Image (tube, helix red, strand yellow):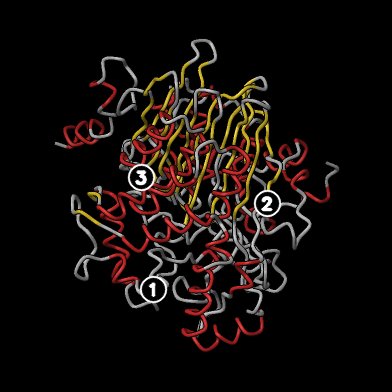
């Protein structure tokens, strides 16, 4: 009987696709999408179709990305919306150059640290709350759209926003996973100031899978943007409505905060890994965590360690632990802190940190000292026939954000300000007009100076871990674009957060969550190395990707099965 149970248990961890797919791709849930003239991959099929339609109309990859993002703000409000922030990487085929845009907003100028501390004391909290007025920062998405459009757009914004406006007015059927998260958000957000319940429920309940949902207020907001441009949001009617509501309800965001908002074009950062170069945006985001992890992992030969083997997972988890302590201590708004990304990404620092990885799980991990050396979110990607590619990520933070909906606007305001620290000695301490630490990160890969892949893995602290796993799956384990995203994932949890004390560090080693198809023998061996291991249900991110095949002149698209979305091309 004992032998039978052992055999049965081991069988349950064999990837089903390994025996079901005749192409022999062990982890792929479907084939890659292949097309010549353009590609769009998003987390909602209707949004993907909108992006493709914009490309067919002669729009650029940037136009398609904005159209798809606008649709997702309607169709997946659990992950994004124009009340949130945006980051993007854009490959310009004409210039053969990668551009980076930081379209994240800043904290209210009129909310001082002293006043915020007073508000938190009244709430009996030491950190910023996840909902309500206090964590609201300036929404950067709309300005990000228009910055992208002004630089790379081809079609008028009225054409770009029209599909989302039509769906907002006429309705669309809610998809399965989005309905699940929507239902979880409604009870805790409905009590917040404003019209969340009127905007995001049907008769007081979240829309169920397949139910038709409409948002006429959002249609009106999009129509204003189409006619009047970004100033409608930051200096016009929308800004005035936000200002008036905040004053009535005791919030701190003001007209001046919106009117003074600007996005920032930034230089992307990169590291080389086995002939491929991964590009990420600099802080205030966490993108360089993926780069730091790759720098450390370069000191090991992962290709000699089988996929999801004990040694492979152990090595990557230990690298993640080291990097995330740096993330907690150093990553913040560079306008307020002198962040030495050059030192954090240096080869000498990576080699020094790699020496700390031993045969067993490290319980205590602290941030390094690089200065001593010399040296819920949505993700979408688009590509057009000219060769332009967009890697775009956008979020309200915590799914549907603060829960605060200004009447008549049709969108919720983000709660990204919750990611400030209240430790005055921390680089990420709350200050007025400061951008908080950000989790959302787009990624891009080049090969020999040419575009190779635009991709992202949405989902909080999972994102840099996911970026690294997908890239290693392709480079070290030979997986194709679809398989690399569908393959079994792990994530490490428990590292110090950028919201905690500057003097805090990891003391208990944290724990690893694994998807269910990791062999139990691997689990046992990881535990023998001192790791705490759990099986996690969900939370492993959401992957979309487009790859350029320079030899055949075609795009490959991929969208994983953990989300509702798909990739499509023409």
For image coordinates 68% across by 72% down, the residue present is: 431
The residue pinned by badge 2 equals 264
Which residue corresponds to mark 1? Answer: 407
In the image shown, does 267 or 410 lie closer to the viewer? 410
Is residue 311 something one can see in this rendering?
no
Question: Is residue 325 placed above or below 111 in the rendered structure?
Answer: above
Q: Mark 1 or mark 2, which is nearer to you?
A: 1
- Left of 407 or right of it: where is 125? right
Mark 3 lies on a secondary structure that is helix
Residue placed furthest toward the right: 374
Callout 2 crowding tier (Cα within 10 Å): few <14, some 14–19, many ≥20: few
The answer to whether mark 2 and mark 3 are in CB contact below 8 A is no
Element type where label 2 sits in the image? strand
For the question of whether residue 165 can be seen, the reply is yes
Q: How dense is the environment of label 3, judged by Cα within 10 Å: few (below 14), some, or many (20 and up)?
A: many
| Mark 3 lies on residue | 163
Q: Nearer the viewer, mark 2 or mark 3?
A: 3
């Amino acid at each position: 009987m004992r032998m039978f149970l052992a055999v049965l248990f081991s069988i349950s961890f064999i990837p089903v696709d390994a025996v079901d797919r005749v192409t022999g791709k062990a982890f792929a849930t479907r084939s890659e999408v292949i097309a010549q003239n353009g590609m769009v991959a998003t987390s909602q099929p209707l949004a993907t179709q909108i992006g493709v339609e914009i490309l067919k109309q002669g729009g650029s990859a940037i136009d398609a990305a904005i159209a798809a993002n606008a649709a997702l703000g309607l169709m997946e409000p659990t992950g994004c919306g124009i009340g949130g922030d945006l980051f993007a990487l854009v490959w310009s085929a004409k210039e053969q150059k990668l551009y980076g845009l930081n379209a994240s907003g800043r904290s209210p100028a009129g909310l001082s640290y002293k006043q915020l501390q007073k508000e938190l004391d009244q709430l009996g909290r030491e950190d910023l709350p996840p909902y309500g007025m206090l964590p609201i920062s300036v929404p950067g998405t709309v300005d990000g759209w228009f910055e992208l459009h002004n630089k790379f757009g081809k079609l008028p914004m009225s054409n770009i926003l029209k599909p989302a406006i039509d769906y907002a007015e006429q309705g669309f059927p809610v998809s399965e996973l989005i309905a699940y998260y929507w239902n979880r958000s409604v009870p805790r957000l409905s009590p917040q100031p404003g019209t969340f319940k009127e905007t995001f429920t049907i008769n007081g309940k979240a829309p169920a899978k397949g139910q038709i949902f409409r948002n006429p207020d959002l249609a009106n907001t999009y129509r204003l943007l189409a006619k009047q441009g970004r100033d409608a949001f930051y200096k016009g009617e929308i800004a005035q409505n936000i200002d008036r509501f905040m004053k009535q309800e005791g919030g701190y965001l003001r007209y001046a905060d919106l009117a003074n908002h600007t996005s920032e074009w930034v230089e992307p950062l990169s590291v080389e890994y086995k002939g491929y170069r991964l590009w990420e945006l600099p802080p205030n985001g966490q993108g360089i965590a993926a780069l730091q992890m790759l720098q450390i992992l370069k000191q090991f030969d992962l290709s000699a360690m089988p996929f999801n083997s004990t040694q492979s997972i152990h090595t990557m988890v230990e690298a993640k632990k080291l990097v995330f302590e740096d993330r907690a201590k150093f990553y913040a708004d560079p306008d307020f802190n002198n962040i030495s990304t050059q030192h954090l990404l240096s080869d000498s620092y990576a080699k020094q940190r790699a020496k700390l990885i031993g045969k067993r799980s490290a319980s205590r991990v602290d941030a390094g000292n690089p200065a001593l050396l010399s040296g819920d979110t949505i993700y979408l990607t688009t590509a057009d026939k000219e060769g332009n590619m967009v890697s775009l990520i956008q979020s309200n933070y915590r799914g549907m954000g603060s829960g605060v909906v200004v009447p008549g606007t049709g969108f919720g305001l983000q709660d990204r300000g919750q990611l400030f620290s209240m430790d005055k000695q921390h680089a990420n301490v709350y200050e007025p007009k400061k951008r908080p630490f950000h989790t959302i990160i787009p990624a891009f890969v080049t090969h020999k100076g040419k575009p190779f892949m635009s991709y992202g893995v949405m989902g909080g602290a999972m994102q840099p871990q996911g970026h690294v796993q997908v890239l290693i799956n392709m480079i070290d384990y030979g997986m194709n674009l679809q398989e690399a995203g569908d393959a079994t994932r792990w994530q490490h949890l428990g590292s110090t957060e950028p919201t905690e004390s500057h003097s805090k560090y990891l003391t208990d080693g944290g724990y690893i969550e694994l998807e269910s198809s990791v062999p139990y023998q691997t689990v046992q061996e990881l535990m023998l190395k001192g790791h705490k291991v759990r099986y996690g249900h969900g939370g492993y991110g959401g992957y979309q990707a487009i790859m350029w095949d320079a030899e055949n002149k075609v795009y490959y698209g991929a969208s994983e099965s953990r989300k509702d979305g798909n990739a499509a091309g023409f």
